[in-house]
Amino acid sequence: MSEFLNHQRFKDESWMTTNEAQQFFKVSRSTLYRWCKTKLLPYTLMGGTRYFPKHFIENLMGQLLNNKP
């Protein structure tokens, strides 16, 4: 049952791959992984691939842009 709910949640959400997130932020893979490690950016692992919730990506971009001088 839990596996089904996780699959349904994954299906209902819009996601970005690591490469898509890198291009969106214009950052390196190591920067993206550091953000994951410090829990700045949540992700889900499926089949060895990281997927990032698109709404978190967009929110983080807004925060980063608002903090720039």
Image (tube, rainbow, N blue to C red):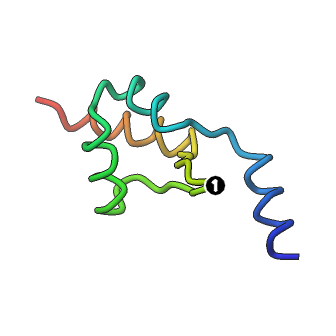
- Where residue 32 sits: x, y (%)? 33, 44
44 left or right of 7 in image: left
Q: Which residue is mark 1?
A: 46
Identified at 27% across, 53% down, the residue is 34
Q: Is residue 8 left or right of residue 28?
A: right
* Element at label 1: strand
Quarter containing the N terminus: bottom right
Q: Position of residue 57 (x, y in %)?
A: 47, 39
15 or 3: nearer the viewer: 3
Q: Which quarter of the rendering shows the C terminus?
A: top left
Q: Amino acid at mark 1?
A: Met
Q: Toward which corner of the image does residue 64 lie, by quadrant?
A: top left
Q: Residues within 10 Å of mark 1 (few under 14, many from 20)?
A: few
Foreground residue among 61 and 22: 22
Q: Is residue 42 above or below residue 18?
A: below
Instruction: Give the percent coordinates (x, y) of residue 54.
Output: 57, 39
User: In the orientation shown, which residue stands out farthest toward the left?
Assistant: 69
Residue 66 is situated, as x and y percent measured from the top left of the image, at: 26, 34
Q: Quadrant of residue 21?
A: top left
Q: Is residue 40 above or below residue 62?
A: below
